[in-house]
Image (cartoon, rainbow, N blue to C red):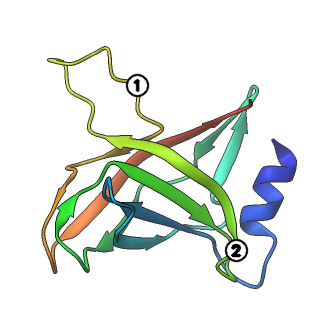
């Protein structure tokens, strides 16, 4: 997992998380802090909530993580919102809302990368 973290943070700037819809259209690109994640046991946990602006309206369902140069590090992460009504969902990227509107802010509340 340390190698994954180095891939995200090792470039000349911070990595990004791209939020995408089911058709893989990028809705928002959020710049992470450095360090982007902390190693917790055998998982990586997002170091800080991350906020950015929506550029294309839609429902975020997928996430990708790239390094500062735009190289893909992780693809096809699940995206959603935590809800007591649907506790069976365990999203890798948790948002404050996944219904994104142009020009509005979206916040990644938490994100987890698990080994395997």
Where is residue 73 drawn, in percent x and y? 70, 60
Residue at the image position 30 percent from the left and 40 percent from the top: 80
Disc 2 residue crowd, few under 14, some 14–19, many 20+, Cα 10 Å: some
Task: Tally the marks.
Answer: 2
Q: Position of residue 92 (x, y in %)?
A: 48, 38
Instruction: Choose the circle earlier in sequence order: 2 or 1.
Output: 2
* Secondary structure type for disc 1: loop
67 sits to left or right of 24 = right
Quadrant assignment for the N terminus = top right
Q: Quadrant of residue 10?
A: bottom right
Q: Residue at x 70, y 74 (%)?
A: 71
Where, quadrant-wise, is the C terminus in this rendering?
A: top right
The residue depicted at 26 percent of the width and 38 percent of the height is 81
- The structure residue drawn at horizontal position 46% and vertical position 54%, both measured from the top left corner, is 63
90 in relation to 91, above or below: above
Callouts 2 and 1 close, C-beta under 8 Å: no
- Quarter of the image for residue 112 reads top right
User: Badge 1, how many Cα within 10 Å: few under 14, some, many 20+?
Assistant: few
Taking the image as shown, residue 18 lies to the left or right of residue 47, namely left
Q: Along the line of sight, which residue is nearer the eye, 99 or 41? A: 99
Of circles 2 and 1, which is in front? 2
Say which quarter of the image contains residue 6. Answer: bottom right
Rendering coords of residue 74 (x, y %): 64, 54
Question: Residue 114 or 58: which is nearer the viewer?
Answer: 58
**Separation of residues labelled 2 and 1 (CA atoms):** 26 Å
Determine which residue is flagged by label 1: 90
Left or right of 85 on screen, residue 12: right
Q: Which residue is mark 2?
A: 71
Return the residue nearer the eye: 77 or 43.
77
Marker disc for residue 15 = none
Q: Secondary structure at mark 2?
A: loop
């Amino acid at each position: 997992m340390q190698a994954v973290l180095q891939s995200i943070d090792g470039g000349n700037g911070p990595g990004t998380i791209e939020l995408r819809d089911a058709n893989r259209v990028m809705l928002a690109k959020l710049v992470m802090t450095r360090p982007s994640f902390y190693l917790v046991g055998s998982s990586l946990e997002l170091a800080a909530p991350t906020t950015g602006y929506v550029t294309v309206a839609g429902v975020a369902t997928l996430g990708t993580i790239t390094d500062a140069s735009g190289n893909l590090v992780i693809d096809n992460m699940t995206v959603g919102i935590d809800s007591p009504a649907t506790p069976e969902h365990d999203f890798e990227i948790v948002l404050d809302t996944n219904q994104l509107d142009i020009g509005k802010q979206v916040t990644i509340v938490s994100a987890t990368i698990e080994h395997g």
